[in-house]
Amino acid sequence: MPGGFMGKVLWADLSTGRLWEENLPEHLYRAYIGGYGLAARIIFERQRPKVDALGPENILAFAAGLLTGSGTPSACRFAVAGKSPLTGTWGDAGCGGFFGPELKATGYDAAFFVGEAPRPAYLSIVDAKASLRDASHLWGRDVPATEEAIQHEMGDEKVRIASIGTAGEMRSLIASIMHDEGRTAGRSGLGAVMGAKRLKAVAVRGNQPVSIAHPERLQELRAEFLKNFKENPTPQANTLTKYGTAGNTANNLTLGATAPKNWALGGRESFPEVDLITGDNVIKYQLRKYACAACPIGCGGIMSVPEGEYQVPRVHKTEYETLAGFGTLCLNSNVESIIKANDICNRYGLDTISASSVVAFALECYENGILTKENADGLELTWGNHKAIVALTEKIARREGVGALLADGVKVAADRLGKGADRFAMHVHGQEVGYHDSRLCPSRGTAYVADPTPGRHTAGGAATAEFGRATSPHPAIQLPKIERYQYTGKGEIQATWSNHKQIVETTGLCLMPSNWNYPIEKFISAVCGWDFTVEEMLLAGERIQTLRHSFNVREGLRPADFKLPDRLIGKPPLTMGPTAGVTIDIDTLVKDYYEAMGWDVQTGVPARERLEKLGLSELVSH
């Protein structure tokens, strides 16, 4: 008997209130794994091209990873997927915490939503019993208040909830989907899709266990992994356990991974105050640590700022991306203001990468006279002005005044402002890029441009090898060593890393430990009962990546539509910091990757023989 998956998904038509379940065959899980892989397969087949991302025809999925809930170390994640209103491309966003295992415990691997509710609603699933409930009284509430109210209504404080705040309700294109007040499915603007569907939340509670095909083998693998993790921790693991990702803020600036002043400067000398927003200066506000389900790392934390102008009674620990965005990118060294901005984003449901990027964009527009004190609601949007940064973040979250102009991200804001504001809009096809500089690791730029979800830092691929952390994504995969600024011959390496990364995401594994010699295929074999090899794993990853890419091709998008901002290429090159003088050859990197994946460099269309190899020819050949 196979294990790992529940074998069925739930559908909800929000327009009519109809709910139904669908059984899925085992071969679909083996081919597309889970999470956004399974969602991509179902959405691609059932959604016609070029639907309005904020319209009723856009299918929105919440899908747990294949290994989520199985007890596999660090496998707890779920994905939200659908067409992105921010980019018009395939969109997905991952989230850790406890929602994913609880979704599976209800008896479903995923929930799919179509239509548009006539009034606000939330979906409740308790042990495979699903119902749509009125959420009119919740509309307008922030995320913590929404979670508290739903738990009270359902009579169970252990109900796990994924919800939107008022930013999603107002269809901000940078709105996120929140879980447990501070875990975030942040990217792709999918919170706006929930808002457009008037879907306030999804609440899950269950007690159905995930079946395990070979429980003794799973226990052996689990014990071996945890023993190695405890006895031979990597420096990265030690940093995460002590500080979370907040421990990376200063080091990333020193190395050149973060670029201050909206990517215009480089190196510690351009922002020497960075030590005030990293490591011990962050966790001194921490009340307690916590770990996501099944995770041995425990990088999470609950923080509080008990006094001062930025009091925050309770907030999840501020992550690196948030510290880099509201801090380094904006030349802001006031850590309490960054914690406050993080709290605003969590309460209203905003992606902190996009929100901080649009704040930095506004500061540069102010510096260049495109925004003024008069048309910025009286705010003095100067670099490092933490009071203005916090005030502007709240205006963006509320869509108030100048915040309404900025609430849909930097591309839309630049279009609205004109006057050359697009020079300061750091995005790829509408999505603000994560804070990992492609001038330091050029293959990061390949991922920003060529991944189906543009601007995604977690899709970095061979950038990890360029950074010197590993030469291979898996102990059984042999890859040649590469030079950081070598531009030819990296396509196959980038493809291998990318295909492996798809499996990390779709199994529900956290990205961090997956880089530590994690034998994913062995865990899949133990949990599911398949003889799942490394070769099959990489083939499944390529299948998922090609299908996500094919979604974009079917939308009429072409490779030339995706451009890396000049600053992230090094045009002109920086004059200071570790990447001074660097200009990367992004065109060669992307061309080599497309060729390695079997995608036409001009049109993006996958080669027929590659589609046949992946079993996709009938699905996508048209």
Image: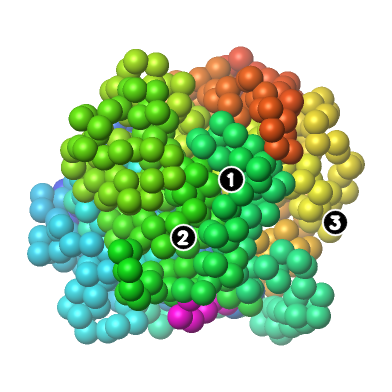
Is residue 600 visible in the rendered structure shown here? no
Q: Is residue 61 above or below residue 137?
A: above
Q: Is residue 558 above or below residue 552?
A: above
- For the point 47% across and 49% down, the residue is 332
Q: Upstream in the sequence, badge 2 or badge 3?
A: 2
**Residue occupied by mark 2:** 335
Tell which tag, 2 or 3, sits nearer the viewer: 2
Q: Is residue 503 above or below residue 542?
A: below
- The residue type indicated by label 3 comes to Ala
Residue 271: image tag: 1
Instruction: Label 3: state its secondary structure.
Output: loop
**Residue occupied by mark 3:** 476
Q: Is residue 453 above or below residue 178?
A: above
Instruction: Label 2: state its secondary structure.
Output: helix
How far is the residue under mark 1 from the one under mark 2? 14 Å
Residue 38 located within the stretch drawn in magenta: no
Q: Upstream in the sequence, badge 1 or badge 2?
A: 1
Residue 54: image tag: none
- For the point 55% across and 60% down, the residue is 276
Q: Residues within 10 Å of mark 3 (few under 14, many from 20)?
A: few
Magenta residues span 286-294
Q: Upstream in the sequence, badge 1 or badge 3?
A: 1
- For the point 86% across and 38% down, the residue is 482
Q: Residues within 10 Å of mark 1 (few under 14, many from 20)?
A: many
